[in-house]
Amino acid sequence: MNILFIMFDQLRFDYLSCAGHPHLHTPHIDSIADMGVRFTRAYVQSPVCGASRMSSYTGRYASSHGAQYNGYPLRVGEITLGDHLRGAGMGCWLIGKTHMVVDSAGMDRLGLARDSVIGARQAECGFDVWARDDGLWAQGPDGFYDAKRSPYNEYLKSKGYPGGNPWNDFANSAAQEGDIASGWFMANADKPANIAEEDSETPWLTSEAIRFIEQADGPWCAHVSYIKPHWPYIVPAPYHDMYGSNHVPAATRHPGERDNPHPVYGAFMNNAIGQAFARDEVRQKVIPAYMGLIKQIDDQMGRLFGFLKDTGRMDDTMIVITSDHGDYLGDHWLGEKDLFHDPSVKVPLIIYDPRAAADATRGTTCDALVQAIDLAPTFLEVAGGEPAGHILEGRSLSPLLYGEMPEDWRDFAISEYDYAMSPACTKLGVEPRDARLFMVTDKRWKFVHAEGGFRPMLFDMEADPEEYFDLGASTEHAEVIALMYDRLGRWGRRMSQRVTLSDTDIVEARGKSRRKGILLGVFDAADVDDDLTGKYRGPVPAGVQAQED
Amino acid sequence: MNILFIMFDQLRFDYLSCAGHPHLHTPHIDSIADMGVRFTRAYVQSPVCGASRMSSYTGRYASSHGAQYNGYPLRVGEITLGDHLRGAGMGCWLIGKTHMVVDSAGMDRLGLARDSVIGARQAECGFDVWARDDGLWAQGPDGFYDAKRSPYNEYLKSKGYPGGNPWNDFANSAAQEGDIASGWFMANADKPANIAEEDSETPWLTSEAIRFIEQADGPWCAHVSYIKPHWPYIVPAPYHDMYGSNHVPAATRHPGERDNPHPVYGAFMNNAIGQAFARDEVRQKVIPAYMGLIKQIDDQMGRLFGFLKDTGRMDDTMIVITSDHGDYLGDHWLGEKDLFHDPSVKVPLIIYDPRAAADATRGTTCDALVQAIDLAPTFLEVAGGEPAGHILEGRSLSPLLYGEMPEDWRDFAISEYDYAMSPACTKLGVEPRDARLFMVTDKRWKFVHAEGGFRPMLFDMEADPEEYFDLGASTEHAEVIALMYDRLGRWGRRMSQRVTLSDTDIVEARGKSRRKGILLGVFDAADVDDDLTGKYRGPVPAGVQAQED
C-alpha cells in the first residue's frame, strides 16, 4: 500500500461540488468522495499554514510541537510523520509546500549538518524532498528568493520565461499595456495570469507528482502539497473568466457581528484584510479567481487520478484530499483565515482506501469530529507500524473508514491560534505569550478561549449554524461555558511530552527496579522473597579492612 | 562569579537546625543561611528524584520536559542549564548524582555519538561530567552496575575494599558475625556502616568537589549533588548512634487520614512503604540513621565551606543548598516521597549571594512561593546570560535576594507526579497516561487534582497546617476548588514548547513578512506605500513568451 497525501492550501471545505457548492463543479475530486469517505467535520489544529502543517506532519497539537505560527521554527528532534513511516518501512516524500522553518540554533547545538541525510530531514520536517516549493518568492535585497527552494521558478526559467522571478512576473501577474498587473493586488484578480496554462503552478506540481510516482519503488507516502488556491488570487486563462459575479455567493455575515464584538475578533475585523474583504468589489474580484483556481485544481486531479488508474496504482494507493485551512472570503467581515469560524478552521477531508474492508463506506459521508492530527496515525497504520500513542496525539481514522464508530471517539475537537506576530497583538496590548486562542468544538457548541483576560466566545451551531451570535457573555450559557472550560482544562493537562516511553514500555517496566535490587519499604530480609534479597545477604567478601573509628 | 549548586537527595525541609529542628544541630548549613536567604516555601516540581531533577536541570515543569518519573529518558535536544550557562560563558559541571536516563532512541535518530562532546552532554542532561555517581548499584546478572558510572565504588576498590561491589557490601551494609547486614533492610539502620567514615560516600563526594574547585578555571557552575540522606538508611560510626529514640518526633499523622481517604492517597498508604513506615519500630530505626546522615553532611559542609573561605572562593561564589524532594518518614502514614504533603514536596532552599546587592537580606527568611525551576534563570542571570523566558519556565530569584518583592510574583506553585510505574496505578485501574497528579498551592490552600476521574484533594494550611483534613469533597469549598481549577487550567495552557523563538524575536519579526513582500488585503497598489509595492510594478521583463491559450 502507498499513500497519496494531497493537501491544498486555503481550500474551503464548501468550495467543492461534493460538499454542495452551487456553482463549482469538481467532478474529479467528487469521484474520490464517491469511492471513499468524505468527512464533514474535519478540523485543522490551527487555522494558519505553518502551524496547521506542523500539526499534520507531526500528528501533534500546535502547543505540543511549539511551531504555533508561520515562521516559528519546528524544534530540532521533534518526531515527524517521516520518522514514523520510515520506521515502518515506508518512504515519506515531499512534492510541494510545507512552510517548514528549520531550527537552525537547535541544529547547531546538536551539531547536525544540513547536508547530511539526518540534517536534511530535520530541516524539512521529516520529509525526503522530491521538490519543495513553498510558492512565495519576492526578489530583491529584502526579498526571500532561494533557487534551491523554488524549483517551479527554475522550471519557468528553463522554459524561457525571462528575468529572475518569473514566478512573480508571469505566473502570478497579468500583463496590461506592457506592465505587470500583479496578482498581489486583488484589483487584478479577474485578469488572466500572463502564462501558458500548462506552465502554471498547479499543472507543474501535478507533473512532478506523476514523475515521482513513475519512479517510486517500495511502499511510499507522497505528500503532494499544492500552494493553490492560496493567494495571490490570479489564474491563467481559460480559468480566469469561468466564473463571474453571478457565481459569488452573498457573504455569510451579519451586521450584529460588528456590534460590540469580542475584542480579538474586532481587531481582526478591523485589520487591512478584514476591511478589504468587507468591500463587495474585493469579493467580486477575488471569489471568481478563487473558484477558477479550484476548477484548475480539479482538472489536474483528473489528470493525476487518470494516471493512477492507467498504472494500476488506484488499487494499492490510499488517497487523501485535504487542506491546511480555509478562507473567509469576506464571511464574518474577515478575509484569509486566522480565526475559528467554519470557513476558516473546517477543511475538506476525503479519504479513499482501496482495501476491501473499506467497501462498506464508499461514497458515504462521516460526521464524526476528526482532526488533521488523525492522519499521521492513520498513515502509520497503513504502513503497518506500531501505534505511537505517546507521541501521536490524533487517532487512526481506520474504524471510520471501515464503517465502525468507536464508542469512545472524541467528543470535542481542538484548534489553536497564536497571533503574537499580528498587529492585533500590539493593538490589544497583549503580551506575545498571551496572544493565543483556543477553540473547543463539539457538534453543537463552538467555544473559543482567548488568553490575556478576555471573555470567551461561544456559538450555538444548532440554533445558529452561521455562527453569527456570540453567546460568550451570556449568563444563560454559564453551564455550557463551564463544560467547555472543563474540556479545555482536561486537554491542557494532556500528556504530550513523554515522547521517549510508550504506555507499553511503562507497563513492561513495572517492578523492574525491584527486580534489579531497589528494595523500598523492607524492614527485614524475611519480608521479601529470597530472589529479591539474595544479593544483599551472605558473608562479607574476604579481606575486609579493619574498620577505623 | 561562580555557582556552587549543592543538592542533597531526600533531605526534608525541616531537618536542619536553621529550620527549627529540635535535636539536629547543623551549624555549617545554618552559617550559609546566616549569610544568605532561607526560603521557607520552596517547592519541587515533582516529589521524586528523576522528574524533580530534570526540572531543576532544564528550568521547566515535568510535563514540559516529559521526563516525568524516574527512568523516563529526557528527550534528546531538550535545552538544559548547561546549554544556557555555556552560552553565557560559564562552565556547567557535575559532581555527583543526576538520575538522568539518556534518550537512546533519540540519540540514534539524530546520529549523535555518545563519545562526542555534544553526545556526551546530551547523555548527561547538559552537564560536563567531573564525576557522576547515582549512588545505587546492585551487582549481578539482573543488577545495574556500570563502572564508568560508579566512581565511588571504584574509589572504594582502589582503597582496598574487596569484591566487586564495596558500595553495597561496605558503604551501605553493616557487619554482623561476619555476615552482611544490608542497609537495604531498615532493621539494620541502627548499625554502623562497615566502612571508615572518611571513606563513606558523603566525604568522598566532598573531596571530589574540592578537587574540582581547586583546578577550575573561568566562571563555573558546579552541581555538587549528594546521594545522602537518601536510603539505604545506614551511616558509619560515629554518626550511627548520635541520635536515639528520644530524638524521634511523633509522626505527623492522624487516625482520620485513614478513614475513607482519597483513593490515590489510600493506595500509597497501603503500599509496602506506607505500611512499613506506619510501624513505630521502623521510624525508631530509620530516623536516627537519617539524622546521622544529615549530621555527617553538615560536618562535610563545614569542610567544604572552610575550603572556600581559605581559597577566597567565598567572595566570588554563589552558594545554593537544596534538595530534590523530602521524605515522609512515617508522616501521614507514608514513607519516602511521591505525594504532596509538605514533608515530601517542600524542600530546603538556602541561597548565599556574595554580592553587595544582597547585603540587605543576609540572615533573613523569605516566604514567597518559589520553585526549583527558579534556579536555572537565577543562575543564568549570575552568568550574565540573556533571559530565556520562552524556554525557562521559572523566574529569577534575584529580586528576592536583593530584598525586593515583585508585585507580580506568582500566586501559586505547581508540582506534578506521574505514578504510572507504581503498583497503585494497576490497583486503581488507571491507564498509564492518566496516572498523574497535579498540585496547586498558594500560601493558604493546597489543592491536588488527580487525573482519571477522581475527586480532588484540598487542604487549608492555615486552619490545618498539618494537612490532616482533606476538604476535596466539601461543598462549602466549591469556590476555592473552582479557583484552583482555574489556576490549573491557566497553567495547563501555558506556552511551554515555543522554544525556538523568544518574545523579543517575535516583536522584532513583526511586519517582516510585509517588508519582504507578502502583501495581504491589498486591493490596489495605491493602497500601500511604494516601498512595499515597488517590486510588483513596472514593465514585464523583456522577452516575454507569447501566451498560449
Image (cartoon, coloured by chain):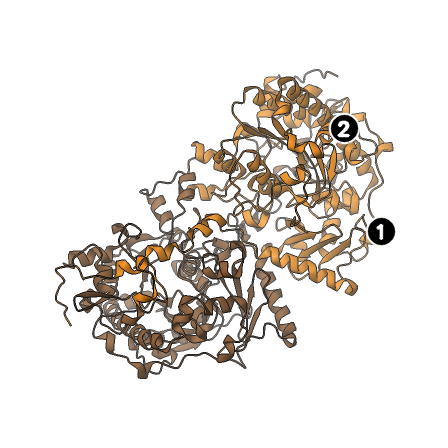
Chain colours: A brown, B orange
Relative placement, left or right, of B94 versus A398 is: right
Amino acid type, callout 1: Pro
Q: Residues within 10 Å of mark 2 (few under 14, many from 20)?
A: many
Q: Circle 2 sits on which residue?
A: B26
The answer to whether residue A110 of the structure is visible from this angle is: no
**Which residue occupies the foreground of this view, B235 or B340?**
B340
Relative placement, left or right, of A269 versus A27 is: right
* Chain letter of the residue beneath label 2 in the structure image: B
- What is the number of the mark on residue A292? none
Q: Residue at x 33, y 43 (%)?
A: A114
Q: Residue at x 52, y 22 (%)?
A: B217
Q: Do marks 1 and 2 share a chain?
A: yes
Quick check: A395 above or below B549? above
Label 1 or label 2, whichever lies nearer to me, is 2
Quick check: A403 above or below B174? below
Give percent across and percent down for residue B133.
Answer: 59, 30
Q: Residues within 10 Å of mark 1 (few under 14, many from 20)?
A: few
Q: Which quadrant, please, contains the C terminus of chain A? A: top right
Quick check: B295 above or below B252? above
- Alpha-carbon span between mark 1 and mark 2: 33 Å
User: Sequence-wise, which precedes: disc 1 or disc 2?
Assistant: 2
Disc 2 element: loop
Q: Which quadrant, please, contains the N terminus of chain A? A: bottom left
- What is the number of the mark on residue B255? 1
Amino acid type, callout 2: Thr
Q: Quadrant of residue B221?
A: top right
